[in-house]
Image: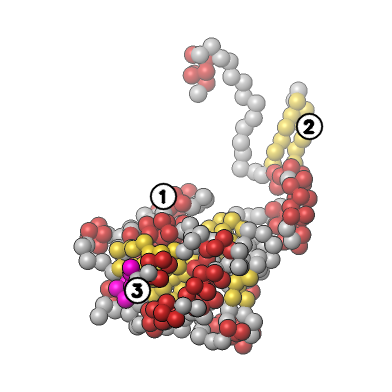
């Protein structure tokens, strides 16, 4: 670089260098005029933003994040399995399991989801609620149903309530979804807005009354959260998470109402005892947490997803379809960039295809 500058008639002067220690040192005329830890300087720099955020969001959450900034160690990832790309043989097949990528007015996650299932060996279909209402498409032909993320009806009646109402208050459509849910050869995935939809429909984790169903409410921070967080995958009956147990992975979240709660604590205990809470937000030590911002919404014990006892239906607030390719990860340790042949999240979609093949009737 110096040679290039010299050849252009420029005389470069080195004014600073980098080092591994988190110390910033500035000198003038051989005299050190500033020497301080980088996290401290960062807090000084962000003090104005911090004070503004306390006025815009829940001050308790903002204080928690501000305290954590000084002690952040960085995310850790644990991948106890070997992620692999889908074989070309599977991708070239002419007959593949068919999955409906369902969207409603305001959905925005359908293309990423379509791509994820396609690269796992599925034949994805773009299906709208209008298609189902007008009988242009029937769910009978599909092995999988995926409710994508977004903001159906702009979240005006609260997240996914408009979408759920369209299904629950139309007898024909309600029966269509119930028949699909009850078939033993089907699976479903609800992500973000789709997760909110599945809880409102009573699909996960148990079929109980409206009053006792798990539900998604407003984030503790009081605002929309778009973050790269870490989650841990626990033992569960979920077919899509098979073989991924004990993984700690980075993933995107983007929601305003993602706090999963149980009005009746009996069903929370039952969910936990039956391992129907397969995904939890974790801190930098890899432990389930209620602390913000590691837990972006305040869900009890860091819960980020729910599944049914038979494992066929899964709902989760994080977006695996936005991290199923390695380049979608905003940060990854250098050794993983070299070692990983595929993103760990692709395994979810490959698991679904394998299950379809094993249960083919």
Whether residue 7 is visible here, answered yes or no, is: yes
Could you tell me which secondary element the residue under label 1 belongs to? helix
Look at 62% across and 24% down and name the residue there: 14
* Number of residues whose C-alpha sits closer than 10 Å to that of mark 3, classed few (under 14), some (14–19) or many (20 or more): some
Residue bounds of the magenta highlight: 136-142
> Which residue is more in the foreground, 37 or 292?
292
The image shows residue 130 at horizontal and vertical percentages of 41, 66
Q: Is residue 138 magenta?
A: yes
Look at 65% across and 26% down and name the residue there: 15
Could you tell me which secondary element the residue under label 3 belongs to? helix
Q: Are marks 3 and 2 in contact (CB under 8 Å)?
A: no
The image shows residue 222 at horizontal and vertical percentages of 69, 62
Could you tell me which secondary element the residue under label 2 belongs to? strand
Q: Nearer the viewer, mark 3 or mark 2?
A: 3
The image shows residue 23 at horizontal and vertical percentages of 69, 41
Q: For residue 33, which numbered disc appears in the image?
A: 2
Instruction: Name the residue carrying label 3.
Output: 139
Q: Image check: 264 left or right of 184?
A: right
Q: Residue furthest top?
A: 9
Q: Are marks 1 and 2 in contact (CB under 8 Å)?
A: no
- Alpha carbons under labels 1 and 3: distance apart: 41 Å
> Which residue is more in the foreground, 37 or 118?
118
* Number of residues whose C-alpha sits closer than 10 Å to that of mark 1, classed few (under 14), some (14–19) or many (20 or more): few
Q: Residue furthest left?
A: 94
Q: Residue furthest front?
A: 134
* Number of residues whose C-alpha sits closer than 10 Å to that of mark 2, classed few (under 14), some (14–19) or many (20 or more): few
Q: Is residue 48 magenta?
A: no
> Which residue is more in the foreground, 252 or 65?
252
Look at 26% across and 77% down and name the residue there: 360
Whether residue 306 is visible here, answered yes or no, is: no
Q: Quadrant of residue 208?
A: bottom right
């Amino acid at each position: 670089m110096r040679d290039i500058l010299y050849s252009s008639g420029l005389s470069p002067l080195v004014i600073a260098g980098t080092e591994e220690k988190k110390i910033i040192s500035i000198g003038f005329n051989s005299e050190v005029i500033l020497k301080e830890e980088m996290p401290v300087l960062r807090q000084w720099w962000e003090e104005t933003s911090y004070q503004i955020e306390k006025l815009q969001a829940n001050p308790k959450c903002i204080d928690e994040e501000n305290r954590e900034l000084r002690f952040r160690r960085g995310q850790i990832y644990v991948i106890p399995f070997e992620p692999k790309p889908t074989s070309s043989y599977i991708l070239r097949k002419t007959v593949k399991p068919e999955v409906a990528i369902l969207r409603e007015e305001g959905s925005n996650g359908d293309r990423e989801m379509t791509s994820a299932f396609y690269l796992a060996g599925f034949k994805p279909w773009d299906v709208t609620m209008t298609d189902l209402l007008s009988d242009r498409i029937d769910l009978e032909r599909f092995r999988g149903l995926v409710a994508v993320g977004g903001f159906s009806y702009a979240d005006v009646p609260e997240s996914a309530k408009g979408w759920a109402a369209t299904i629950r208050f139309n007898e024909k459509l309600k029966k269509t979804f119930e028949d699909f849910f009850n078939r033993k050869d089907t699976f479903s995935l609800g992500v973000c807005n789709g997760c909110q939809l599945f809880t409102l429909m009573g699909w996960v984790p148990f079929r109980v009354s409206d009053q006792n169903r798990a539900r998604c409410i407003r984030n503790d921070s009081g605002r929309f959260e778009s973050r790269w967080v870490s989650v841990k995958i626990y033992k569960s009956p979920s077919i899509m998470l098979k073989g991924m147990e004990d993984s700690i992975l980075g993933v995107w979240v983007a929601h305003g109402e993602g706090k999963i709660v149980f009005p009746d604590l009996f069903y929370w205990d039952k969910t936990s005892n039956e391992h129907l809470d397969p995904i939890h937000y974790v801190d930098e030590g890899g432990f389930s947490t209620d602390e913000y911002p590691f837990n972006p919404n305040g869900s009890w014990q860091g819960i980020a997803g729910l599944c049914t006892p038979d494992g066929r239906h899964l709902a989760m607030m994080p977006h695996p379809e936005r991290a199923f390719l390695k380049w979608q990860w905003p940060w990854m340790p250098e050794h993983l960039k070299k070692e990983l042949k595929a993103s760990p999240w692709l395994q979810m979609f490959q698991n679904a295809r394998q299950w379809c093949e094993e249960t083919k009737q």
